[in-house]
Amino acid sequence: MSTRAKTTFIIIGAICLIGFIAGRGSHSVVVDFAFRFTTLALFIALLCYLAGAKIKAFFKNRTTGIANEFSSLEEAKAEAMRNIKEVEERISRLDEERRGILDSYRAQGEALSRDIIGKAEKAAAQIMAQARASAQSEMDKAREQLRADIAEEIVAAAEKLLHERLNAAEHEKLITKSLTKVVLN
């Protein structure tokens, strides 16, 4: 057994003996108080002797832990302050960003509008060209139809006039003349 263990057993035995003596007999209040105080002092001394180093280490570690935690909290506070400043700067730049975005969308809208108007103008020009071509075609057809109608009327009028002016002998003479021209040519 080590010396420390022996000393511990001796101290515990002394405390028990003092407590036993204090509890026996009829002593005055002062003597009883003195025994109790001595028991308490020996117990505290034994506690410090046995666990003093561990208690010191605990409180030292606790102090170091609190200091480290305080330091990390200070760092976190500084980081939070930097983040707050960054957010405030972003908020102040938000109006500029909003204007930039609006200008960008406005420019895109104007470009799209110009493109749509250009396409519409091209489509309108194509439609106008088709309409002109269709109108010209219709006019040409109408002219041809008018010419055909006029030719038919002229032929009918000429036929009528020939029937009125030509008799059978002149008609025969005209046919013979036409046939001789065709045969001779």
Image (cartoon, helix red, strand yellow):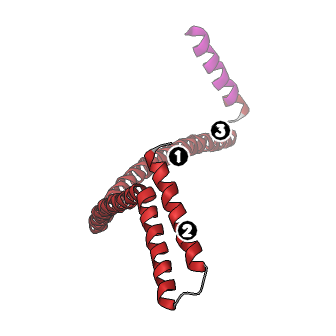
Report the disc number at residue 17: 2
181 to the left or right of 60? right
Give the extent of the magenta segment: 171-185
Question: On the image, numbered disc 1 is attached to which residue?
Answer: 139
In front: 95, or 86?
86
Residue type at mark 3 is Leu
Label 2 environment density (alpha carbons within 10 Å; few <14, some 14–19, many ≥20):
few
Which residue sits at x=68%, y=43%?
A: 160
**Outermost residue, top direction?**
184
SS for callout 1: helix
In front: 83, or 177?
83
Question: On the image, numbered disc 3 is attached to which residue?
Answer: 162
Q: Earlier in the sequence, mark 2 or mark 1?
A: 2
> Please, what is the dominant secondary structure of the magenta stretch?
helix
In front: 145, or 93?
93
Nearer the observer: mark 1 or 3; the answer is 1
Q: Earlier in the sequence, mark 1 or mark 3?
A: 1
Residue type at mark 2 is Leu
Residue type at mark 1 is Met
Cα–Cα gap, marks 3 and 2: 174 Å
Number of on-image labels: 3
Q: Earlier in the sequence, mark 3 or mark 2?
A: 2
